[in-house]
Amino acid sequence: MAERTIRVDYLARVEGEGALKVRIENGRVEDVELKIFEPPRFFEAFLRGRSYLEAPDITARICGICPVAYQMSSAHAMERALGMTVDGPLRELRRLLYCGEWIESHALHIYLLHAPDFLGYPDAIRLAKDHPEAVAHGLALKKAGNALMQVLGGREIHPINPRVGGFYRVPTRGELEALRPMLSNALGLAEETVRFVAGLDFPDIEEEYEFVALQHPREYPMNEGSVASSRGLHLPVTEFEDVFEEVQVPHSNALQSVRRGAGSYLVGPLARYALNHDRLSPRALSAAHAAGLPPVVRNPYRSIVVRAVEVVYAVEEALRILDAYTPPPAPYVEPPASFHATEGAAITEAPRGMLYHRYRLNADGLIDEAKIVAPTSQNQKRIEDDLRHLVERSLDLDEATLTDACERAIRNHDPCISCATHFLSLDVERR
Amino acid sequence: MHEEALLRDLVRKVGEVAHAHRAERVTRVRLWVGAFAHLSPPQLRERWTTAAADTPAERAELDIEFSHDTSDPRATGIVLVSVDAEPSR
């Protein structure tokens, strides 16, 4: 029979993945529950039985925005388990790749997800109509980050080139040098971005966060460091699970991480900056000063400025690495030829905050147990606390305005549900 | 993860259209992909075979128009424009 064409014109949808339930009794907020519908994805379970070499490639699929973070944390954890040391140009190339991810992820969040909130637009498309130059800056920055990912990672999303021990292939000096004009231009755009976001209008709010981030003696942290907190905690990565635990709550599919006996804490740009701002590069530091940032920023809305300062840092750091680059003698450090049962853990700083991986390997080099604690699960409980405080301040708002305010408060922390929370459904129960 | 949600939604819609028109097989799917869409045309092509396995669209050819217009109100979206289908015998 004859084939025919059926006209459809249907716009594909991503359904909302978050809901907020608020219970108010006698004018007091009794309960605030942030529900995440995204089903469990079972990555820790299906890593079991796979080769240690596969972990970076498998875990990269957890996130399309920050795949490098998963590759770095898993590769470092495996190297610790196997007693491997990756240093010199290979260590620098990893840092360069991470710069690419910070640039592209932060640029995406600043311009496409967060800036529209401050300027009164529902999304970046509407923002682009009135502020085309701002969105163009954001896209140009994102492109520079993506270019680093392409050259070092083999492709922009879910890179395929990083591996345990280093890379499958390392770039030539010429390949990196070709990125210089784009990065030099990006440095100016990044500084302009700090000026742009510093001029936004911020609600006058401060939260009492316990900031938790990696801390490194010399560097603004990306791949290495010990775990530090603004309340005096200082511990090696291997003790992370002694101090922090993931708990399941009945109302959400997402796990919540808490500091044992102390409750919620915050990871991400505000935490990194609070604990490491003196290790920023010169231009990033002067951009922070010019933007009027104090050494500790407790206003969650001003995270957009800190994120912009981190973009300046990442571009400047990328240029520093590019200047000093000499290709290593081999693209990766050879793993040991024979195995014994072993275990290793690592934390690296994803754009959204600390990402913890721990693996237990058997004598065949296969994964017996995997534990992954993502930044969003670490911030989840803290985001609920922010929302509770927001609702307490906003009891007189109508529900549409309150929904909008809650979505904004969530986006301050750039969680993995950032874009989905444009579809947050709010359920207010008043008694 | 949104990539999967979008793909599943597209495949589901194509299946619904095929069913509503009593089509046995979908031979061609035309898509319009916005400048800021979650999936690029190469990603769509790569993933379509798996996403559409065991559906009437399993062997459908993808005809993708990629828009560079960043000011299009649908720029973040993917539109299922039309479906070519063979009716059941």
Image (cartoon, coloured by chain):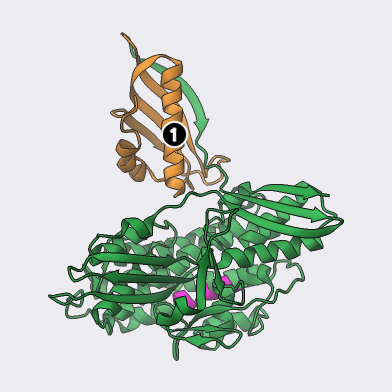
User: What is the quadrant of the C terminus of chain B in the image?
Assistant: top left
Place residue A268 in its image quadrant.
Answer: bottom right
Give percent across and percent down for residue A158: 35, 58
Range drawn in magenta: A306-315
Place residue A261 in its image quadrant.
Answer: bottom right
Q: Chain of mark 1?
A: B
User: Is residue A127 among the parts visible in the rendering?
Assistant: yes
The amino acid beneath tag 1 is: Leu
Q: Main secondary structure of the magenta part?
A: helix
Is residue A222 part of the magenta span, yes or no? no
Which is more toward the observer, A302 or A142? A302
Chain identifier of the orange chain:
B
Which is more toward the observer, A100 or A138? A100
Q: Who's the residue at 50% across and 58% down the image?
A: A139
Residue identifier under label 1: B10
Q: Who's the residue at 46% across and 44% down the image?
A: B68
Q: Colour of chain A?
A: green
Q: Judge left or right: residue B71 versus residue A322.
A: right
Give percent across and percent down for residue A56: 31, 64
